[in-house]
Amino acid sequence: MANGEIGKTVVLVAHGSGMAAYDALWRERVLKHLGEEFPRVRFHMGVLNGELEAWEAFPKDVRGGWAVMPLVLSDGVVTRVQLPSALSEYGRRLGCVPDVEMLPLPGVRTELDGAVRRVLEGWRELGGAECGRKGVLVIQHGSMRHPVRSGEAMARRWAEVYPEYGGFYAGYLSQEPGMDAVLAEIPEKEVVVVNWFLNCGNHVMEGIPSLLGLKDVGVCGKDVFGWRNAGDKRIFYTTPVGESPEFMKAVTGVVRDWLAGSGGKV
């Protein structure tokens, strides 16, 4: 594998969380992990909404094999609109059409099932009632212009894997059905929230808690934020999936599969 890594470049492109400090810490952690796993591959990262624009992270020297990984958990406006636009801008500035391979999303890999399992099994350690079935609310960003429905698909799949829970529900931040409306209709009085986001930015730390009626969600960097009261419900609010070790395994898996499929060619 090492010989196949020589001369390869992977550019990771994320949306950006709106909090530069969190983005910088998360970027450093991801690049450090990948650099240790694949020391002979060059990794760069840009964000679509941040200080370093995505096209600025693309390589100036386009010789050799390189690829772009959309660092998102679900297909949507980033993969369909924003990333193609960034590649177009890069090609315009370069003066040619870039020959680049688009890698799969890490969010579709089964490694992330482990992150969900960690959330669904973690509430017991922090004071959840053993009696009564708990609802599970999967929260994604979504887009009104480019709506996704992957949350519903995940909820159905996990409902089969974890039959001991009550209902599994999907709600969105920027499309219908809105997560606050979904929460209001959940019959279970204790609800576990799965934050299907990459890191602790504006959405996870401020926007979502505000819409769910949560206060003081705690400090990012732990596996879970813990139980919080929200009206007539108790919410088990958790860190985003992208902060989990399983997410790093998923990203590593995407790169490893790409290198294996390249046949070791430089």
Image (tube, helix red, strand yellow):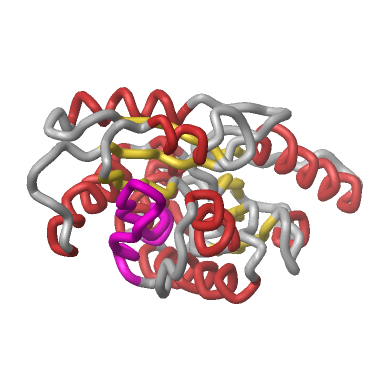
119 left or right, relative to 17: left
Rendered location of residue 45, percent (x, y): 61, 62
Rendered location of residue 44, percent (x, y): 61, 63
Q: Residue at x 18, y 34 (%)?
A: 165
Rendered location of residue 237, percent (x, y): 36, 56
Relative to 87, is 184 above or below? above
Rendered location of residue 5, percent (x, y): 46, 56
Q: Residue at x 37, y 39 (%)?
A: 137
71 left or right, relative to 146: left
The part of the image, by quadrant, that contains residue 55 is bottom right
Q: Residue at x 18, y 30 (%)?
A: 161
Q: Is residue 223 in the magenta section?
A: yes
43 left or right, relative to 52: left
Which residue ends up furthest to the left in the rendered image? 131
- Given residues 184 and 33, the one toward you in this image is 184
- Given residues 48 and 44, the one toward you in this image is 48
Relative to 112, is 143 above or below? above
**What's the magenta region?**
222-243
Q: Is residue 39 visible?
A: no
Q: Residue at x 66, y 60 (%)?
A: 46
- Given residues 16 and 95, the one toward you in this image is 16
